[in-house]
Amino acid sequence: MNRPKLDFPALLGDLDAGVFLDKVTRAIQEAAIATGVHGDKGKQGSVTLKFDFARHGDSQSHMTCVHKITTTKPEPKGKTTTENTTETPLYLNRHGIPSVLPESEQEDWLNSNQE
């Protein structure tokens, strides 16, 4: 039996009400531009993503995902580092796949879109 797999790009697109992926894209672009302009003498830019998960009370299926983007950009005399931390409530379905919708609402949504 094939278990459903996490659609990671879709989950990233759902985080932070759909804004997270835009923030990651902008961070990558800014780090790359700063590295191109100020990356001499071994200076490097970087983007780091961190995801922390915390349960809501006794629930095994309702949690919060705290997502943090850390961007480091080289500057003429050093570097700048910025952090953007937001959170998204998630539900864990019976196959262990996190989603912004509870499983029953996912099924309703899928069924309504097939009509």
Image (cartoon, rainbow, N blue to C red):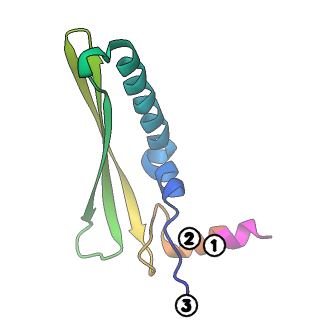
In this view, the residue farthest toward the bottom is 1
**Residue at horizontal 70 percent and vertical 73 percent from the top:** 111
Start and end of the magenta stretch? Answer: 110-115
- Tell me which amino acid carries mark 1: Asp
Q: Closer to the camera, 99 or 73?
A: 73
96 with respect to 63 (left or right): right
Q: Which residue is mark 1?
A: 108
Q: Position of residue 64 (x, y in %)?
A: 31, 59
Main SS of the magenta segment?
helix
Q: Are marks 2 and 1 in contact (CB under 8 Å)?
A: yes
Q: Which mark is residue 105?
A: 2
Q: Quadrant of the N terminus?
A: bottom right
Q: Are marks 2 and 3 in contact (CB under 8 Å)?
A: no
Magenta stretch: residue 31 in it?
Answer: no
**Residue at horizontal 48 percent and vertical 59 percent from the top:** 8
Q: Quadrant of the C terminus?
A: bottom right
Q: Position of residue 78 (x, y in %)?
A: 19, 15
In this view, the residue farthest toward the right is 115
Which secondary structure lies at badge 2? helix
- Tell me which amino acid carries mark 3: Met
